[in-house]
Image (spheres, coloured by chain):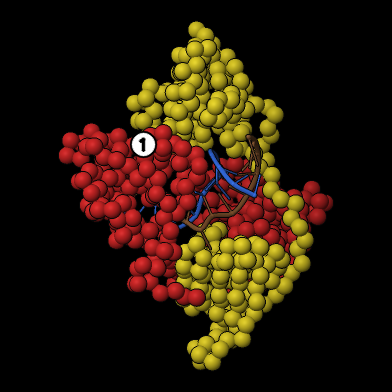
Chain colours: A yellow, B red, C brown, D blue
Amino acid sequence: MRLVIARCSVDYAGRLSAHLPLATRLLMIKSDGSLLVHSDGGSYKPLNWMSPPCSIRTLEPDADQVEAGVVELWKVTQAKTADILVVSIHEVLHDSSHEMGIDPGLTKDGVEADLQRLLAEQIDLLGEGHTLVRREYMTAIGPVDILARDASGGAVAVELKRRGDIDGVEQLTRYLELMNRDPHLAPVTGVFAAQEIKPQARALAQDRGIRCLLLDYDAMRGLDDSHSRLF
Amino acid sequence: MRLVIARCSVDYAGRLSAHLPLATRLLMIKSDGSLLVHSDGGSYKPLNWMSPPCSIRTLEPDADQVEAGVVELWKVTQAKTADILVVSIHEVLHDSSHEMGIDPGLTKDGVEADLQRLLAEQIDLLGEGHTLVRREYMTAIGPVDILARDASGGAVAVELKRRGDIDGVEQLTRYLELMNRDPHLAPVTGVFAAQEIKPQARALAQDRGIRCLLLDYDAMRGLDDSHSRLF
DNA sequence: GGGTCGATCTCGGAA
DNA sequence: TTCCGAGGTCGACCC
C-alpha cells in the first residue's frame, strides 16, 4: 500500500462525472491498483475512488498544466467499464509504501440470519401456543422467512427484518397473496417482525391486516446461552 | 489526520458484533475523531470503522494482553449509540500526522436528477405527441417523478430510475393506485423508465400493465448541447 | 429532528 | 455469471 498526502484536484468520468477542487488529501493506492481519495473528515466513504481492477499511469503534465502548478498527473483507468479518474498533483507532502499481506477478513454476527435463528428457537414470541413449521419456507416467488402455526393450527407467515421498512411489508404481502391461493395453507395470516418498524411500514401493515411484532435482539440473545459477550 | 500502519486485531460491538484477527493494516484517524481500518485490497469500504462523533482513548494493556503481545490498546466509543471498537496493537510499523484543512467537497452530474431533467426536455421519448405536465408532481404519498399527458390527453405517471429494480415498480404501483382514485386524473397509465431494467422488475411491471421504457443517457445527453465532455 | 430515497452504492449468497 | 436483497448502509433533501 502506498500512502501519499498531496495538494491535488481530481476529475472522474464514468457512470457519472465528478470534480474535486484543489485541496490537501490522502491518496491511498492499494496493491490491487485501486485508488482512494480521502479527506480529513466525513464518513468512511472516500471523496472519490476507483475500484479494482484498474491501472494507474503517471504522466508528465503538459505546458498549460505546469503553468497551473501541476507537478504530476495520475491517470487511473478501468478496462471493463471505461471509467477514468485523473489526479492532478500540485504538491506532494508525504509519500510512503508499506507491505501488508493479505487480510484474513472479517467475521460477523448479529445480522438477520441470527434474528431468524433466535425467533425460530423462541417461536412463542409470536404468541402463546405457536409452533414452528420451518425456516425459509419455499414458495414460487422466494422463501418466506418463517412459517409457523398458531394455537388453533392456522398458518402464520413471518417476514423478518432488522429494520422494518415499507419494502418488507410489500414483500410479505406478495407472499401472503400467493400462499392464500394454496388450499393446503389458506387462510394464512402475516406477521411483520423487526427490531425497529418505521411508522409508514406499520401503517401499511395494519391496512393490510398484517400484525407487527417488535423484537428485542439483546433479550433474545440473552436467552440463548450459546452466545457470550465480548465486552 | 493520523496514519498508523500496525499489526493489530480489532473487535467491534454495536449494531452487530465483528472481529478481525491479527494482521497488518492501515489505521486512519481523522480530525473529527473517526477511525477507519483498511486492508491492502478490496474496495473503498474499510474492514471496520467508527463514525463520528466518537472519541479514542489509548489504554495500557493488562498483564494477559501483554503476554499475548499487545503493546497498545485503542478504545473507540460513540456516546449516542453505545457502539464500541477496540484495536489491539501488537506492533507499530509507521505513524505520521498531517494537517489537511477542510475539504471543499465534490460536485457531481449524471445522477437521477439529470436523467429526469433530460426526459422532461425530451418528453416525446414517452411516445409521439406526449406533453409534460410537470416534474415532481406531488401526491399524498410522495412526488411522482414526471407527470405527462399522451396524444389523446390521458394522464401518464413516470417513475424514473437509473437501475430499474422491483422496488421502483412497487413505488409506481402505489402512486398509480392513489392517482387513479382522483377523478381529475383517472385513468392514469404508468411508465417505468430506466437506463437498465431487471428482468424481475420488467415481469412485475408487465403483470401490472405498466409500460417499460429503456433510456439511453448518453444519447439523451448528446441531444442536450448544454453539456460538454471533460474527456 | 425525523422520514424517505438515491447511490460510481458495496457486499454476500444463491440460482 | 447474474440476480437479488441487506447494510453498523451513507448522504441529500424535504418536511
| Viewer-side residue, B144 vs D2 | D2
Place residue A117 in its image quadrant. Answer: top right
- Residue wearing tag 1: B209
Q: Is residue A49 visible?
A: yes
Residue B68, compared with residue A164, is above or below; it is below
For this orientation, the residue located farthest to the right is B67
Residue A64: % across, % down: 50, 90
Residue B81, compared with residue A82, is above or below; it is above
Residue B65: % across, % down: 77, 50
**How many numbered discs?**
1
Residue B214: % across, % down: 42, 52
x 46%, y 41%: residue: B201
Picture quarter with the N terminus of chain B = bottom right
For this orientation, the residue located farthest to the top is A152
Chain for mark 1?
A: B
x 48%, y 26%: residue: A175
Residue B224, compared with residue A152, is above or below; it is below
x 64%, y 80%: residue: A58
Residue A159, compared with residue C3, is above or below; it is above
Place residue B221 in its image quadrant. Answer: bottom left
| Viewer-side residue, A109 vs A225 | A109
Q: Is residue A214 visible?
A: no
Secondary structure beneath dot 1 equals loop
**Residue type marked 1:** Gly
Residue A229: % across, % down: 66, 37
For this orientation, the residue located farthest to the left is B184
Could you classify mark 1 by the number of other residues whose Cα lies within 10 Å: few (under 14), some (14-19), or many (20 or more)?
few
x 28%, y 53%: residue: B128
